[in-house]
Amino acid sequence: LVTTAESASTASVQELEIARRCPCSPNAQHIEFQQQGRPVKVTLTTLTPDAPVWAVSSHADIRTMLTDMRFSADREKQGFPFQVDGQPGNFRRTMISMDGAEHRDVRRAVTSEFTLKRMKSLQPRIQQIVDGCIDAMLAGPKPVDLVSAFSLPVPSLVICEQLGVPYEGHEFFQTRSHKLLLRGASAEERLRALDELLAFLSDLITKKEAEPTDDLLGRQIVKLREAGTYRHEDLVRMAFLLLVAGHETTANMISLGAMVLIDRPDDAAALRADPRKIPVAVEELLRYFTIAEFIPTRVATEDVELGGSLIKAGDVLVALCNVANRDPVVFPDGNDLDLQRGARHQLAFGFGAHQCLGQNLARMELEIVYSTLLRRIPTLRSAVPTGDLPFKCDADIYGIHEFPVTW
Ligand code: HEM
């Protein structure tokens, strides 16, 4: 039996709930959708009016959605969800919104910068950065906000060094990235933040064009010039994507993981005693929090049957990755946080051609961060009950706004 947008519209169609109500559980509506066992037609007021939207919630359907090339990631396509005020084109020409050969070529130009081997070579420097932030924290007053003293600076410093963006600009780009990902910000504010970030990176890249530096952006200029494919605007957008994706995401996972280690002293003790268990714990934390839960969205380019529902050309699909990461078919007792689970096949980094380019970097940062926090600040604790922390129910990437800690 196949459900179409038309037949589904005879039943009451719900507005897709975006805000997470509880830090540790998917939205109840998403759980209900998953129980229906097929993609469910919903509405989404942030979308161009009348574009049919499907909430996709099973692990298997999301994997199909993210690998079937008939579902496009092109944000210029009409009706694409979560555009700033429905204005197409703002994010265009970054790889995340390209399809097919164009996507493959643009991504391929930077994949060598994110291989496991390359990340291993960065390990000592990342450790130094983490230690430096902890030294500064330990030397300062308590309580301290873990987010601004540690969670944000670590991945920001790492991505800045990798790209060749001077860290002195961190406040500028952190505030703009934050605004860009904040749902409460007006379309105008988001657009201004976007334009300011692009202008900042454009100036920086102009300087590098005159004298290419030995960093990701400098190397791209040299490499693409040699290939005869270099375009200033393209590199600005690439830099924008890597800078924003490279720090906000990991920063939020750092805070959430630290909260878990504080709340679960037995788990923390086990990991401290045997740090080889940390990579498995990282995978489970990524699954459990699935912080970028609405990022993978697509538009159908032709009629496609997906998991028992008929998706029509032009319909929009939103992957509910958080609930899919609790899909009982793949993760038994998925609501339990089990740091020894070994959550292979988790979807926190997406799946398919657009699967997170920075995942090796993110994993390495998180492993170094958690092991160093456990070793160097074993008495780390929250200065307020963790249930009272200001969770980011209002942002595109889930996390914690502020996290006062002491030791
Ligand atoms: C793509 C999540 C860290 C760069 C994605 C996607 C997700 C994701 C879900 C897929 C989007 C889609 O299918 O439309 C995360 C999470 C992170 C993280 C949860 C940290 C815990 C990073 C880092 C970087 C990065 C550190 C860069 C340095 C990218 C890029 C893409 C991407 C460039 C687009 C890939 C493509 O379109 O081919 N990320 N990310 N991410 N991520 Fe990440």
Image (tube, grey):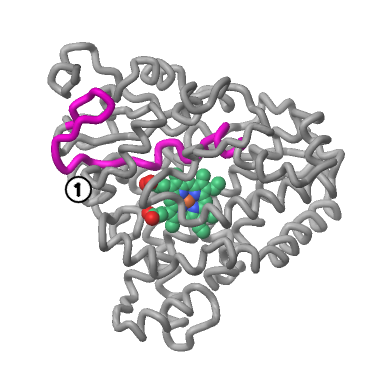
Camera sees residue 157? yes
Q: Quadrant of residue 254?
A: top right
Q: Is mark 1 within 8 Å of ligand 1?
A: no
- Measured as percent of width and height from the top left, residue 183 is found at 42, 38
The residue that appears at 60% across and 43% down in the rendered structure is: 253
Residue 132 falls within the magenta-colored stretch: no
> Which residue is at a point 41% across and 80% down the rendered structure image?
221
Disc 1 crowd, CA 10 A, few/some/many (<14, 14-19, 20+): some
62 and 221: which is toward the camera: 62
**Image location of residue 377, percent across then percent down:** 84, 45
Q: Residue at x 38, y 24 (%)?
A: 17
Residue 311 coordinates in the image, percent (x, y): 19, 31
Q: Which residue is mark 1?
A: 77
294 inside magenta stretch: yes
In the picture provided, is 136 more to the left or to the right than 241?
right
- Between 401 and 331, the residue placed more toward the observer is 331
Residue 44 lies, with reference to residue 215, above or below; the image says above
Whether 246 is drawn above or below 217: the answer is above
- The number of numbered badges drawn on the structure is 1
Q: Quadrant where the N terminus lies? A: top left
Q: Position of residue 291 (x, y in %)?
A: 52, 38
Q: Is residue 44 left or right of residue 128?
A: left
> Which amino acid is tagged 1?
Lys
**149 is higher (above) or lower (below) than 329:** below
Q: Which residues are magenta?
A: 284-311
Q: Is residue 189 visible?
A: no
Q: Secondary structure at mark 1?
A: loop
Residue furthest to the bottom: 210
